[in-house]
Amino acid sequence: MDLSKFTQINPPHRLLMGPGPINADPRVLRAMSSQLLGQYDPAMTQYMNEVMALYRGVFRTENRWTMLIDGTSRAGIEAILLSAIRPSNKVLVPVFGRFGLLLCEIARRCRAEVHTIEVPWGEVFTPDQIEDAIKKVKPRLLLTVQGDTSTTMLQPLEKLGAICKKYGVLFYTDATASLAGNALETDAWGLDAVSAGMQKCLCGPSGTSPITLSPAMEEAIRKRKCVEEGIRTDAHQNGVDEMIYSNYFDLGMIMDYWGPERLNHHTEATSALFGARECARLILEEGLDNSIALHKLHGDALLKGIQGMGLETFGNLQHKMNNVLGVMIPQGVNGDQVRKLMLEDFGIEIGTSFGPLIGKVWRIGTMGYNARKDCVMQTLSALESVLTHFGFRTTQGAAMQAAWDHYNGSR
Amino acid sequence: MDLSKFTQINPPHRLLMGPGPINADPRVLRAMSSQLLGQYDPAMTQYMNEVMALYRGVFRTENRWTMLIDGTSRAGIEAILLSAIRPSNKVLVPVFGRFGLLLCEIARRCRAEVHTIEVPWGEVFTPDQIEDAIKKVKPRLLLTVQGDTSTTMLQPLEKLGAICKKYGVLFYTDATASLAGNALETDAWGLDAVSAGMQKCLCGPSGTSPITLSPAMEEAIRKRKCVEEGIRTDAHQNGVDEMIYSNYFDLGMIMDYWGPERLNHHTEATSALFGARECARLILEEGLDNSIALHKLHGDALLKGIQGMGLETFGNLQHKMNNVLGVMIPQGVNGDQVRKLMLEDFGIEIGTSFGPLIGKVWRIGTMGYNARKDCVMQTLSALESVLTHFGFRTTQGAAMQAAWDHYNGSR
């Protein structure tokens, strides 16, 4: 094998302004380069406990079971769905984009009976629409996406917890793309489970998924307890409900690993945990509300700039996520050629789309480490240059001036 | 929330001489601290292709589907088992330690009909024993562990591929703890699937799992193809067999993500991928056979030292893994007190045991970045000091001299 072409890792410099992953905060990457610890080293279990405490702050919850799932954001989703859904359970999924379809897909693989309601891409649901569907379907779980980057829309969740409580429904949301960039109040909104990812507003690399579980969700999962044979003792009692059809995603066992029994399960991904701890620490140090306000500031500045350039946006702006914007590709412009030139000649990545929006919409993110004025200004400037190059007419400098005006509050 | 006690990551210095995780190679940690790339950046997909090529070298295979599963080593196991086992399939698991029981546990959660054969902990199986069981059980899959750290034994695999072929059985091994420290020849031994982990002989942190799949295994998995709704097009055809009951671990979709279609699945854990690439690159640069020989050299030196100290070892030494040794805790000595003093006063971690060996056996590893003379000598020296402190009689200096003699080839 000729190894000469496999040189050491040296990625080209990129400014990642798509819907995520985005550039990681260098402080997070430095934390991840720390040397490892043994799984049960007191220093390691202390770090695990600190991660639990810090993510309680990020999720705004008192939930004891607030921890990491070792895998990407969809590992967190699947761990919750596989552990909570028993085969043939009814679940309701309000679908307003691709990630709602992903929840359906995962729920089907859990052998759930999946019911959906839909709105056109670019819209969200009213609480009434969801309550009506709950009355009709009588699901055991309501599975929602908070921010669906495929449409850039943010589903309002604050009234759904009370509705779920009224009908005895467990309430889950996928906050992968929204957490720390948009308000999420786990306890105040009555959520029973939330999962997230690192690579959006949390400023880290994909690879571990923070989750939180309410006491009601814990109880449902504990009923399915099944301690694995290699470490089971006479003191362990299995639950009364059907077991969870995964070992890796069995949240009962993962709780016992993060809890005082420290029952061996996987070998915690230490570097990812170090990174996740630093992400939460930096956000709480800045203040979670400040983090959300910054995402709104820079998201709005980008929006003004895009509008100033004379471009149309996608979707209902009243329900836009703070951290990502859908931009209509102007007629006569090849969206992929623009993205290619932005990447190759300016080192800036903006996103393409999925499904019905392919070829019609770019998605531009302003999140996490890249929720910064310089990132917004560079992106607008490069986009104006590239569009001009391809013959799209715009007023020179108008985009950047609109963003400046927004930053200066001079409108 | 009082953040003052959450200082930046600063783990105490540890020499990790247990059964894994061990200290990561600093070059791997440095590679992991590189800035991120977008998922479909040509530089990123190039790195993904390079990872596939490099792990073909490490697994000694031509298998096209050689890639990473984003999760710890048991994520790799579960991805293969969930994708390969259809509900009610018969599987045969030769159990010689805890990780054989883990395969049974995961297979049961895949709703397999699980058959086992067992030998006492500390022994392994002959090919005849396994062939006899295959003839009796007629399984669809043979699930083996190559190196089971719970007993420190290495199951010989080289003759099992031909037996499996004879009876039409798919042949899997879990090489988490053995790969790169003990010989493994995926193609020459007729393996259909192998999974591994980073935190043992591969010198990295836990968090991603390299796997390889033979063409026969690929065919079995492709029959269960089920493209997820959010990205399915009319050009996609689903398979004829029952779908895989997981989205995250659906190897069909993971192949389509790593393959030329680059069909969106998870967001690859980029930092973990950078680390895994550096691990494989460093091992192949050194030479895989040299890596294995080094593990044997240092493993044997530790063994001689332990014997020189007058301690008994656990299990059949003829079948010991190169990279971990079971040491009988001498009568009258409290194993946990010894481990505590080793950790607290010498900064050295050695391992405890599982199940029937708890309180009876320590497990001492010499693997990956810690397969080094200085690690062996420091560990022996500290262990002699601690045992002397607790009143165990040994000849002063004999352990270290035995190791030196082994290194100097002067026996």
Image (tube, coloured by chain):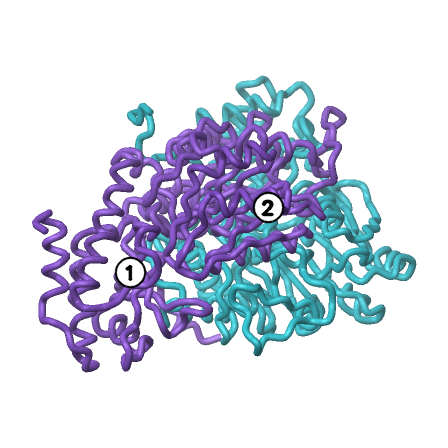
Chain colours: A purple, B cyan
- Residue A102 x %, y %: 53, 57
**Disc 1: which residue:** A17
Q: Amino acid at mark 2?
A: Leu
- Residue A188 x %, y %: 42, 30
* Gap in angstroms between the C-alphas marked 2 and 1: 30 Å
**Disc 2: which residue:** A81
Q: Amino acid at mark 1?
A: Met
Residue at point 30% right, 72% down? A329
**What chain is tagged by disc 2?**
A
Above or below: residue A218 compared with residue B194: above
- Residue B166 x %, y %: 84, 71
Query: Which of the 4 quarters of the picture holds residue B365?
Result: top right
Residue at point 81% right, 56% down? B88
On screen, residue B29 versus residue A247, left or right, reads left
Q: Secondary structure at mark 1?
A: loop
The answer to which of B107 and A367 lies nearer the viewer is A367
Using the image, tell me which numbered label, if any, was put on residue A56.
none
Q: Is residue A10 visible?
A: no
Q: Residues within 10 Å of mark 2 (few under 14, many from 20)?
A: many
Q: Is residue B234 visible?
A: yes
Query: Which of the 4 quarters of the picture holds residue A14?
Result: bottom left
Mark before the other along the chain sequence, 2 or 1: 1
The answer to which of B365 and B400 lies nearer the viewer is B365
Residue at point 68% right, 45% down? A89
Query: Which of the 4 quarters of the picture holds residue B256?
Result: bottom right
- Residue A46 x %, y %: 44, 28
**What chain is tagged by disc 1?**
A
